[in-house]
Amino acid sequence: MKMLKGQIVFSQMEGENLKLTIRKNDCSGNQQKGEEVIIVHKYDSTLAIGACVTVSNNSQVKNISSFSPRNPF
């Protein structure tokens, strides 16, 4: 899988990891449809539902949103 960009649409704890469902899109908020991928990633509090993320070839997920889930305002 090549690097992808998208939004987290679902998150669920799985042991000490997060099971993330990521919808591939440009994170503009205008796209409601898109292919979804499921990735299990170690817990990270910045990986909240709605966050725009990139996923690298080795399944590392990085939040690239302009907001912080800890301080949304």
Image: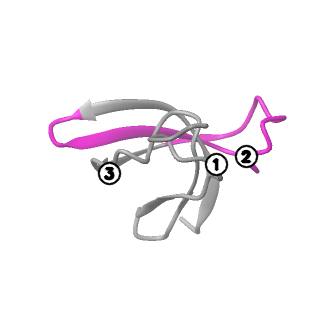
Label 3 Cα crowd, 10 Å radius (few <14 / some 14-19 / many 20+) = some
**Residue indicated by mark 3:** 41
- The Cα–Cα distance between marks 2 and 1, rounded to whole angstroms, is 6 Å
Type of residue at label 2?
A: Cys
> Which quadrant of the view contains residue 11?
top left
- What residue sits 58% from the left and 67% below the top? 3
x and y percent of residue 36 in the render?
59, 39
> Is 29 placed left or right of 69 in the picture?
right
Q: Residue at x 73, y 46 (%)?
A: 27
Relative to 18, is 58 above or below? below
- The residue nearer to you, when weighing 53 against 71, is 71
What distance separates the C-alpha of mark 2 from that of mark 3?
20 Å
> Residue at left 31%, top 41%?
18
Task: Kindly indicate the quadrant of the structure image that contains residue 54.
Answer: bottom right
Q: Which residue is mark 1?
A: 6
Q: How many marks?
A: 3
Is-magenta flag for residue 19?
A: yes
Label 2 or label 3, whichever lies nearer to me, is: 2
Given residues 72 and 19, the one toward you in this image is 72
10 Å crowding of disc 1: few (<14), some (14-19), many (20+): many
Location of the C terminus (image quadrant): top right
| CB within 8 Å, label 2 to label 1 | yes
The kind of residue on which mark 1 rests is Gly
Give the residue pinned by disc 2: 27
Q: Secondary structure at mark 1?
A: strand
Residue type at mark 3: give it: His
First in sequence: mark 2 or mark 1? 1
Q: Residue furthest left?
A: 15
Q: Position of residue 44 (x, y in %)?
A: 33, 49
Crowd class of label 2 (few under 14; some 14 to 19; many from 20; radius 10 Å): some
The range drawn in magenta is: 14-37
Relative depth, front residue between 64 and 21 = 64
